[in-house]
Amino acid sequence: VQLQASGGGEVQPGGSLRLSCAASAFSLDHYGIGWFRQAPGKEREAISCIANSNPTTYYADSAKGRFTISSDNADNTVYLQMSSLKPEDTAVYYCAADLFGCTYWKRTYRGPIDSKYWGQGTQVTVSS
């Protein structure tokens, strides 16, 4: 399992970013892929997940209406389109592969225990 996260950067409040999580050495068909974020001094937060089996998606309350998760199975990549970004969205964003799809995803979910299911983080900074 290999995951490569990218797409972070610095944007002004109200701006948009699209994060990508490219998977290799495994198929998206067998895993849920999701995004977590962690801001300095704060706990890791489960943001969004997508899977082929129900529940097919999950969005944290903080992401609903602003973030959209999608997958491109041809490219084996999951995207997180983030719009109307706020300073409180500033964090390092991580993608992870979940053997249980999005079944256990909720705000306090900490994600896979095994580090091999995690990609590296990508920094998102929302600042004026």
Image (cartoon, helix red, strand yellow):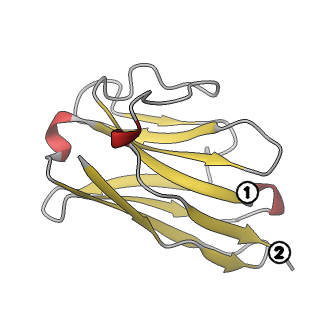
Residue tagged by mark 2? 127
The residue depicted at 64 percent of the width and 37 percent of the height is 45
Which of these two is toward me, 17 or 36?
36
The correct choice, above or below, for 10 with respect to 117 in the image is below
Mark positioned earlier in the residue sequence (2 or 1)? 1
The correct choice, above or below, for 4 with respect to 28 in the image is below
The correct choice, above or below, for 46 with respect to 91 in the image is above
Whole-angstrom CA distance, mark 2 to mark 1, is 10 Å
* Quadrant including the C terminus: bottom right
Please tell me in which quadrant of the rendered image residue 104 appears.
top left
Residues packed near mark 2 inside 10 Å, few (<14), some (14 to 19) or many (20 plus) = some
The numbered mark at residue 16 is none
Q: Position of residue 108 (x, y in %)?
A: 64, 24
Q: Position of residue 111 (x, y in %)?
A: 48, 30
Residue tagged by mark 1? 89
* Left or right, residue 103 beside residue 92: left
Q: Position of residue 44 (x, y in %)?
A: 66, 38
Q: Are marks 2 and 1 in contact (CB under 8 Å)?
A: no
Q: Going by the picture, which residue comes out furthest to the top?
A: 104
The amino acid beneath tag 1 is Asp
Residues packed near mark 1 inside 10 Å, few (<14), some (14 to 19) or many (20 plus) = many
Which of these two is toward me, 88 or 42?
42
The amino acid beneath tag 2 is Ser
The correct choice, above or below, for 53 with respect to 117 in the image is above
The residue depicted at 70 percent of the width and 43 percent of the height is 62
* Left or right, residue 72 beside residue 12: left
The residue depicted at 49 percent of the width and 73 percent of the height is 7
Please tell me in which quadrant of the rendered image residue 116 appears.
top left
Q: Secondary structure at mark 1?
A: helix
